[in-house]
Image: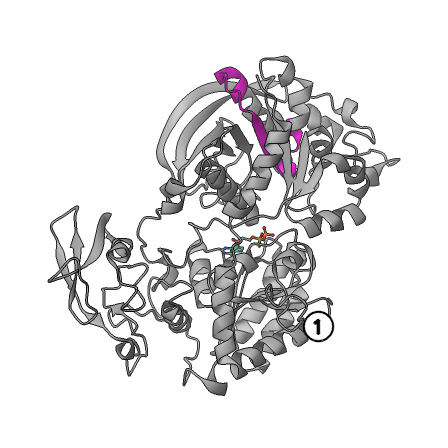
Amino acid sequence: MTLGICLPSSFSISPIPKTKSSITSSSIHRCFCRINSYDFVVVNKTNKKKLKPCKNYFLYSNSCDVKIPAAQIGAAELEDSTTKSGFKNLVWPSPDDEIPFWRREFPTWDVNSDDSVNAEKDSDLLHIVHATAEMAPIAKVGGLGDVVTGLARACITRGHKVDVMLPFYECIQRQHINNLVLISTYASYFNGDWIPTNAYRGEVSGISVIFIEPSNHFFKGQSVYGGSYNELEAYLFFSRACLEWMQVTGTRPDFIHVHEWQTGALPLLYWDMYQDLSLKKPRIVLTIHNMEHYGECSQEQLSKCGLDGSVYATEDKAVDDRTIGHNPERLSLLKGGIVYSNAVVTVSPTYLKETLCSGWLASTLLRNRDKYSGILNGIDSAMWNPATDVFLPAKFDAENFQGKNVCKRFVQRGLGLALEGTSSGSDRVPLVVCVTRLVAQKGLHLLTHAIHRVDELGGQMVVLGRAPDGRVEREFENLANLYNQGSSIRILLMYSEELSHMLYAAADMVLVPSMYEPCGLAQMIGMRYGAIPVVRKTGGLADTVFDIDEGSQPELANGFVFEGIDQGSLNWALDRAFSYYREKPNEWATTLQKVMKVDNSWNKTAGQYIDLYNTLRVKW
Ligand code: ADP
C-alpha cells in the first residue's frame, strides 16, 4: 500500500515512506519537513514507536510547540477523482496567476545533506582555490557554475579546504549568500593604475566564497556576461586581483584551479610575477569546459594586466595560431592557460578525444598531451535531488515516484498544457523538456525541428532557454508566438533556476540534440529526476547515455541516442522514445527507475580530481 500525507501546499515531506513494511522508526526520522525554518518530523499520534499505516499522523516539531494534524491516505485516494492530483491541498497553478508558479516563495535551500556529514574523509588534505567567472546558484549562466559548486562541495565533503574566488557582479543573487563580510581592502594593478579593491567573504551552499569588487566599472550590470564594460579586460583584471589578494593576505593554497578563458591569464601572471614573490607553493590546474571561446586578446590588452604582451606572442606560448602572419597577430588566453598550467582537464573522455582531433587548439593540446586529461563532470546530488528539492510541488525518488506525476500535472496546469485523459495506453502524452542556452552549439535547427515533430506525434514539449544573440531570440520568439497559443508546446525565453528544477521533475524525456557537447549536465540532471534522455551522440553525451535498442550493453542502456545532424536522425530517436513510452508503460517505468539510480554525482568523479591534485602537489 502506498502512503501519502495531505499537507498544505507550503509543506514538503521527503521522502514519504512507500510501503507499510518500509515504515520503521529510522524512516520516521528521515521523514521531515521544514516550515518557516522549523524542522518537523512525521510521527504517529498515538504510538511513536509502532507506526501503523491506518492511523492519523501529526506533523510534530521538536523545535517549536506546534502540532498540525495530517491525514494519512491510501493509494486510491492519491488519485483525486476530479483533479487526479492526489495532493488535495496543493495550490494548483494556472497560466493566469498573477505570480507565475516558478516565482512563488520557496523554503530556504539547505543543501547540506546527510551524505556530507557521513562521507569518508581523505587522509592527505589540500587547500584549493577556484578562480572562476561563474558559480551556481549565485552567478550561473550554464554548466560552468554548476561544476564549480559541485566539485567544490564534493572536495569539502572529503575534508579538503576550498575557497571560490568570484567577481562581485552587481547582479549576483545575494539572497543565497550567508555571512557576507568585508575581509580586505587592497589595490590591484590594471592599465598603469592600482585599482582600490574590496574582498568580501561569504558562504554559498556551504562553500567559502571570496568576492572581488573593484572600485571601477567592471562587473556592473544586470547579467553575468554582456555588461557595458570590456569583458576581456575585466577578467584580466580579475585574474590578477585573485593573485594579488593571495599575495597581500598571505594565502598559500596548494592549488589554484582556473576555469575557461576568463581566468586563462592567471597561470601566465603566476609564473611571470607571483611565483617570484611569496606565492611559491600553489600549482595551477585549468579546466576547459568548452573550447568555443578562446579569450581572443591583443598584445596591448594583455599588457594591461602588467604582463609584457610581446613576450607571449609566439607559437609555443599564447599566440592564436590562426592569426600567425596576420597583421596584427592575436593572442588567446585559453591557449596561454593551457601552456602555463601544470595540468589541463576537460570535462569528458570523449570530448578529450574530439579536441585532440579537431579545432585549432588541437596542436597545442597534442604538444601538451602529457598533462591533458578528461574527467567527466558530475552533478551535485544534494542540489539536484528530487527527494528534497524545495522547488518541487511533490518530492519523489526511484522507489516512490508518485510525486513525479504530480510534478507533471502541476507544470501542465501552470503552463496551460492539456491534461492527459487517462494514465495508460495510447492516451499517455509524453512531455519532452529542453532546458538550454539557445546557442548554435545546442543544435538549434534540431531543437526547432523537435518542436514540430513532438507536436506532430501528439506529445508535449517545453523549451526553457535564453538566447544571448538577438537574431536567435527573435527566431524563437516567432516560434513561441506560433506555438504558445496551443495546448501542447511552450517556448519560454528566459532563465529560471526554479522552473528548470520543476521541468526536469515533470519531464518524461529530456532532449539534448547538441552539435557538440563537452559534457552536458541536462541529461544527467534529467535522469536523476526520472526523465529519459534523448540525445545526440557527441562529447559527454556519448559517455553518459546508451541507447536502449542498441543491445550490446543492456546493463548501461538508459536512453535514446542518434548520431546524424539531420532531422531524420532526430526523428528516429524521438519516434522510438514515443513508441516505447506509449506501448511499453511497464518497461518505461522500469527504465525510469533505472535512470534515477544512475550515479552521475560528483561523489563518483571528484576523486579523479583529487588524484590529479595529489600527483602535482608540492609538499612544503
Ligand atoms: P552549458 O554549460 O553548455 O550551458 P550544460 O548542460 O553543461 O550546458 O549545463 C547547463 C546548465 O544550465 C544546466 O544546469 C541547465 O539546467 C542550466 N540552464 C541552461 N539554460 C537554463 C535556463 N534558461 N534556465 C535555467 N537553467 C538553465
> Which quadrant holds the C terminus?
top right
Crowding at mark 1 (Cα within 10 Å: few <14, some 14-19, many 20+): some
> Which quadrant holds the N terminus?
bottom left
- Horizontal side of residue 407 vs 579, given as left or right: left
Instruction: Respond yes or no on whether mark 1 lies under 8 Å from ligand 1.
Output: no
Asked whether residue 149 is drawn in magenta, I would say no
Q: Which residues are magenta?
A: 245-266
The answer to whether one can see residue 430 in this image is no
The answer to whether one can see residue 606 in this image is yes
Total marks shown come to 1
Q: Front-most of 111 and 433?
A: 111
Residue at 52 percent of width and 59 percent of height: 598
Q: Quadrant of ligand 1?
A: bottom right
The image position of residue 377, as x and y in percent, is 58, 48
Which residue is the extreme one toward the right? 325
- Horizontal side of residue 95 vs 553, given as left or right: left
Secondary structure at numbered mark 1:
helix
Q: Amino acid at mark 1?
A: Ser
Residue at 66 percent of width and 76 percent of height: 571
The answer to whether 502 is drawn above or below residue 211 in the figure is below
The image position of residue 305, as x and y in percent, is 64, 24
